[in-house]
Amino acid sequence: MSAQARLNRLWYGSRAPAALLPAEWLYGAVGALRRGAYRRGWLGSRRVARPVVVVGNLTVGGAGKTPLVAWLAARLAASGCRPGIATRGYRGSAHRARLVMAGDTAAVVGDEPLLLARRGVGPVAVGRERVAAAELLIASGCDVIVCDDGLQHYALARDVEIAVVDGDRRLGNGHLLPAGPLREPARRLREVDAVVVNGGVAAAGELAMRLVPGEAVRIRDGVRAPLAAFAGRPVHAVAGIANPARYFRMLRGAGIEPIEHPLDDHARIGAAELAFGDDKPVLMTEKDAVKCADLADERHWYVPVDARFDAADEATLLGVVMRSI
């Protein structure tokens, strides 16, 4: 079992160990001092020349932020805006802010930025300094910046905050790091402009999002096939995301029999991770697929997902964003 899997079992499946509570207290105290320093102006929070929408979460790991960012950028573009997406580029080697090109590699720019760039929903910039990434997008003609992650990156001032919650796992055991999965206290959700719940059951005041799978895409040549083409037979299912069980459940919902291969979130994928010793099809997430172009053959496919809302929640979320920007 990987270190991430052990932590997930601890954070989402049990009470916090008493031995970790002092470390949690220290983490919380440092975080509170940092947030207070930004609120009081002791640490600088810089405002760029265009509106900024931050899509983030409170927990370590993904909760569905990237599909929501793609959805929001597409809706903003449809309304006449010119959105750009700023992100850190986690696990990419790029340090300075730079635009992401479709021909880049995940090793340089990160897997999620490359996914978004290849989706074509708008210019994407990576940078450990989110302010520099946002300014690069503005210089490229963008008139609204959507940040993929960055709820805790207070150096960049924002006009809208959207928090995404995994509807299956919610906030785990409710404790801060390292005793639990929270990067900030749960009460932080009361400060954001909208709370979007990915799957599960949304509570009062929350907006319900679901992820809908599209056709499978063969990595090698882009050929598409309906998921029904894989139904009724076992396939290898690879998921290097924060909650692999959600991906496997989605495949089972399409009548597919997944042989589950969960990986750590943002895992680096090599030939060993795809060597299963047979000729069964391999279905992976889109985030994993951007790291596998040089490894893929006719067996390897990915299943893209798109964010969806009902009409009322979509209107509410877009209203919150458009009024603020």
Image (tube, rainbow, N blue to C red):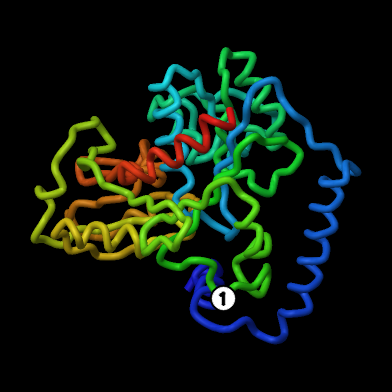
Reply above or below: 84 against 182.
above
- Residue kind at label 1, given as amino acid type: Asn
- Could you say which is closer to the camera, residue 35 or residue 315? 315
Asked which quadrant contains residue 201, the reply is bottom left
Q: Nearer the viewer, residue 268 or 161?
A: 161
Residue furthest bottom as drawn:
18
Name the residue beneath numbered marker 1: 173
Judge the density around disc 1: few (<14), some (14-19), many (≥20) Cα neighbours within 10 Å: some
Determine whether, in the image, residue 75 is placed left or right of residue 89.
left
Which residue: 59% across, 32% down? 324
- In the rendered image, the residue lying farthest to the right is 42
* Residue 264 position within the rendered picture, expressed as x and y whole percent measured from the top left: 48, 60
Q: In which quadrant will I find the C terminus? A: top right
x then y, percent, for residue 134:
65, 26
In the rendered image of this protein, does residue 300 appear above or below residue 81?
below
The number of numbered badges drawn on the structure is: 1
Image x and y of residue 281, in percent = 19, 52
Task: For mark 1, give the secondary structure.
Answer: loop
> Which residue is depicted at the point 42% across and 21% down?
79
Q: Using the image as rendered, state which of residue 278 and residue 238 is in the foreground.
A: 238
Horizontal side of 224 relative to 100 (left or right) equals left
Q: Could you tell me residue 6's position as x and y percent?
A: 53, 74
Query: For the point 24% across and 52% down, which residue is it?
Result: 282
Q: Is residue 319 depicted above or below 184 in this figure?
A: above
Name the residue rendered at 41%, 60% in the picture: 202
